[in-house]
Amino acid sequence: MTSSVREQAVDAFLASAPEPARTEMLRLRALIHRVAKELPRVGQLAESLKWGQPSFTPQKANVGSSVRLAPSADGRVGLYFICRTGLVNRFREIYPQGLVFEGNRAILLTPGGAVDRDILAHCIAMALTYHLDRQGT
């Protein structure tokens, strides 16, 4: 299976990221794809660069919101969500402990740091099904 030009751009971005952020972003990429695969309503994800960051979006229309990854200047990795969705505020309500948030747009992770991957998976699932959940389907 050949990858698209967009997926190749994501691969190149990740390959050029500094360690240990690269390893963390590769783990997160795998987690995002695993979560999507476990959600039959989501289906395949499209990978591309949006705002210069790897972005993962359901290929089906009106299913969910994108999830993006990017290293931060302080060495952490951001799991970014569209700020207008209110998703990060919802995550903050559900998980007031255990996650570090950046405003209304990101969950920040320390590469190699302890974080509950089940909580991250739930947050990712909420983003990937955002439109379905708003429609009540």
Image (cartoon, rainbow, N blue to C red):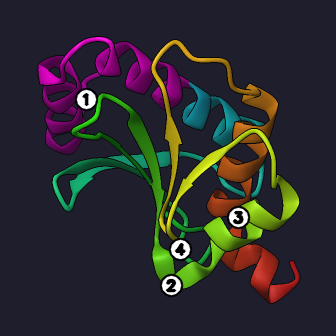
**Foreground tag (3 vs 1):** 3
Ranked by sequence position, the earlier of labels 4 and 2 is: 4
Q: Left or right: 28 with respect to 95?
A: left
Q: How far apart are marks 3 and 2 (CA)?
A: 15 Å
Ranked by sequence position, the earlier of labels 3 and 1 is: 1
Q: Left or right: 80 with respect to 18?
A: right
| Rendered view: 125 above or below 91 | above
Disc 3 residue type?
A: Thr
Quadrant in which the N terminus appears: top left
| Rendered view: 117 above or below 87 | above
Label 4, on which residue? 61
Disc 1 residue type?
A: Ser
Residue located at (82% from left, 67% from top): 93
Residue located at (32% from left, 12% from top): 20
Label 4 crowd bin: few (<14), some (14–19), many (20+), radius 10 Å? few
Please provide the residue range marked out in magenta.
1-30
Q: Left or right: 101 with respect to 115?
A: left
Q: How far apart are marks 3 and 4 (CA)?
A: 11 Å
* Label drawn at residue 12: none
x and y percentages locating residue 111 in the rendered image: 45, 19
To which quarter of the image does residue 47 belong?
top left
- SS under mark 3: loop
